[in-house]
Image (spheres, helix red, strand yellow):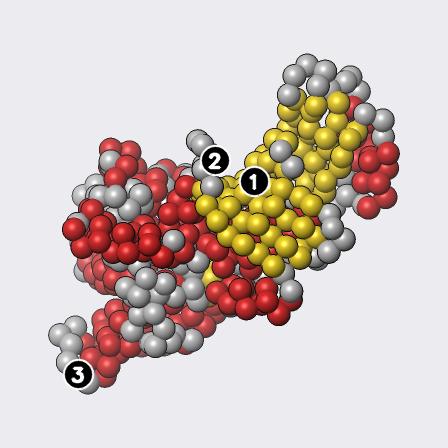
Amino acid sequence: MNLLDIIGPIMVGPSSSHTAGAVKIGLVSRKLMVEKVVKADIYFHGSFLATGKGHGTDKAVVAGLLGIAVDDSRVPFSFEVAKEEGMEFQISGIDLGDAHPNTVKLNLTGESGKEIEVIAASIGGGRIEVQEIDGLSASFGGDYPTLIVNHKDRPGRVTSVTARLAECNINIATMKLYRTVRGGDAVMIIECDQEVPVESIKWLEELEGISKVTYLSLQG
Amino acid sequence: MYKSLAEICEIEKREGIPFWKIVQQADCVETGMPETEAFEKMRVMYQAMKEADDSYDGELKSASGLVGGEGKKMQEAREAGMTVCGRLMGKVMEKALKTGESNACMKRIVAAPTAGSCGVVPAVFITLEEEKHFTEEKMIEAMYVAAGIGGVIAHRAFLAGAAGGCQAEIGSASAMAAGGVAYLMGGDSEAIANAAALALKNLLGLACDPVAGLVEVPCVKRNVIGAINALAAADMTVAGISSKIPPDEVIDAMRSIGRNMDEDIRETGKGGLAGTPTGVKISEQMEKLG
């Protein structure tokens, strides 16, 4: 935490968790999609569902999906912007069990027809945690360039990925590794201090035993 | 970020560096940002506070319709000479309401330390700049003082209503503003810490009990008490009145009270004002809206 977390951020109200955090979930999900979102099914859980209307959580998530920033005065008018930009959306409630009270599930379709499912929570002070992408566990805050690599739980996978990052002179800030069962599906989540070049992501996608690479860039 | 206000006071005594600079230097070490650049970022925060104040719209209503137009009413009453508190205090109240309302109406504000308590620091600081004619540079130094106090509170206790009740939000904002005013009035680190302690002490135990879970009732008006309390704490400090409990221990008391607070009065929208018959009725009406 630094001083500009104490005084700051500049944001559209009323709530850092229910508004600013919700915008950020939309923004991060849009970036995970990489392309323009044309359709969004938004499912609110818990406190997001109960008090979301009053906090503008619905408008906030839609704003984020449109690329509207946390401090952009257009946040409350995001439904109108969605209409202008041709993004369809529908909002409903969902019970995600014992998920964090401020959780939302997003089913997004991009302009090329690409689909992605994101489950994320707003964990306070405008900070968020992406918890699931396409049904697979994830855990990151969207504050760093983040590489999400789905792979088979086999020896050497982590080395091949991290070696490539080292070659590109990319420093790893944090790293998490999960697997379903021994030898089963696994995922590594790597938060980096530098952006990962597109060629490296393509290279990783071709690597044996790696089923999918998702990348969250903070640029653009 | 410093772990105690006592530590900052010691550094000032030992090295003769003012509070705001001590806090800034430590932050720049952490973020790796040059001090001049960091100062400009803080200026952006202060200017955003002023913009929020300037762009207030008294015609707006919040999502629930519970909030809107209070700042305008306060301004009219002050300008008509109807208020007991006079010009300066009237302005502080008016600005606290305006920023708090703007937040409730989805306008752009600066969380300080939170969105719910965003009216306290700007109400006090902008009014003092206007009425006492401090330079903007001096105001930004005061912003550092406020942020430094908030940093110590974040380290020792909490700044979120969900964690420690409203004392953690409005109480912290009030302590931050009080320290800033003590600095503007020529106080050293001891005075800054004392003003922060006096302000926080007065708001210990304050519940976070928002009606329907919304940042509206009582949040907007609580910004007023946070701001006025900050001025009172700073004036008591100027008069030489000291907190008998050391500042860091006051913050620790806030933490221990927060830990003892029932979940019902920690931003859940269940207890306190939210749990009154009227509060419950409003909540039910909001739920129908979905």
Q: Nearer the viewer, residue A177 or B139?
A: A177
Q: Report crowding for label 1: few under 14, some 14 to 19, many 20 or more residues within 10 A (C-alpha).
A: many
Is residue B227 something one can see in this rendering?
A: no
Looking at numbered disc 1 in the image, what kind of residue is underneath it? Ile
* Chain identity of mark 3: B
Q: Position of residue A205 (x, y in %)?
A: 82, 36
* Chain identity of mark 2: A
Relative vertical location of residue A177 with respect to residue A32 in this rendering, above or below: above
The residue wearing badge 3 is: B81
Q: Nearer the viewer, residue B239 or A169?
A: A169
Q: Earlier in the sequence, mark 1 or mark 2?
A: 2
Determine whether the residue tagged by mark 3 lies in a helix, strand or loop. loop
Which residue lies at the image location 48% right of the left edge and 35% below the top edge? A96
Q: Is residue B214 left or right of residue B18?
A: left
Relative vertical location of residue A187 with respect to residue B244 in this rendering, above or below: above
Q: Position of residue A13 (x, y in %)?
A: 43, 60
- Same subunit, tags 1 and 3: no
Q: Quadrant of residue B71?
A: bottom left
Looking at numbered disc 3 in the image, what kind of residue is underneath it? Gly
Determine whether the residue tagged by mark 2 lies in a helix, strand or loop. loop
* Chain identity of mark 1: A
Which residue lies at the image location 61% right of the left edge and 46% below the top edge? A107
Looking at numbered disc 2 in the image, what kind of residue is underneath it? Leu
Q: State how far apart marks 1 and 3 are (Cα).
A: 54 Å
Which residue lies at the image location 36% right of the left edge and 63% below the top edge? B63
The dot on residue A96 is 2
- Same subunit, tags 3 and 2: no
Tags 1 and 3 touching, CB below 8 Å: no
User: Which numbered disc, 1 or 3, marks the residue closer to the eye?
Assistant: 1
The dot on residue A119 is 1
Q: Position of residue B96 (x, y in %)?
A: 31, 66
